[in-house]
Amino acid sequence: MVVSLDARNNHPRATTVLVVPLSTTLPRLPTHISLSPGETGLAENSTVQAENITTVLKTSLQEPRQKLRRLSERTIERTARCVVMAMGFAP
């Protein structure tokens, strides 16, 4: 899940994007959010793992096989709260 601003994502000198990884492991932590295939376009249920936020080199990304999806504002807000929680701040 790319969470960096589009201005950064599209900037020619920015070599990375900020991402929160998804996993097929069932949620086990308060910083995990379950997503259905309908939300993500993936074949199976996924879990956002907000505690693992990281940067990824743009050159390591592949062209999408299908149109990219935008998650709901609710899911984006929940993810942001979980990232803040993972940093040790009260939500």
Image (cartoon, rainbow, N blue to C red):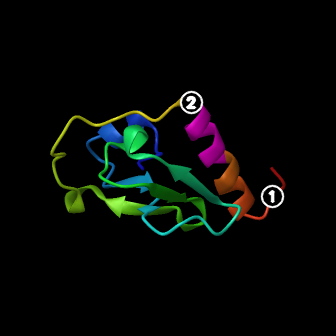
Q: Quadrant of residue 31?
A: bottom right
Question: Could you tell me which residue is drawn at 15 percent across and 48 percent down?
Answer: 63
Q: What span is colored magenta in the figure?
A: 73-80
Label drawn at residue 73? 2
Q: Is residue 29 left or right of residue 56?
A: right
Residues 59 and 28: in front is 28
Residues 19 and 59: in front is 19
Q: Amino acid at mark 1?
A: Phe
Residues 56 and 51: in front is 51
Question: Could you tell me which residue is drawn at 50 percent across and 58 percent down?
Answer: 47
Q: Quick one: which residue is furthest to the right in this view?
A: 90
For the residue labelled by badge 2, is the local secondary structure a helix, a strand or a loop? helix
Q: CA distance from mark 1 to mark 2?
A: 21 Å
- The x and y percentages for residue 23 are 43, 64
- The x and y percentages for residue 81 are 70, 47
Crowdedness near tag 1: few (<14), some (14–19) or many (≥20) residues, C-alpha within 10 Å: few
Vertical comparison of 12 with 82: above or below: above
Total tally of numbered discs in the picture: 2
Crowdedness near tag 2: few (<14), some (14–19) or many (≥20) residues, C-alpha within 10 Å: few
Vertical comparison of 10 with 13: above or below: above
In this rendering, the label closer to the viewer, 1 or 2: 2
Q: Amino acid at mark 2?
A: Glu
Q: Main secondary structure of the magenta part?
A: helix
Q: Please report whichever mark, 1 or 2, sits nearer to the chain's N-terminal start.
A: 2
Q: Which residue is mark 1?
A: 89
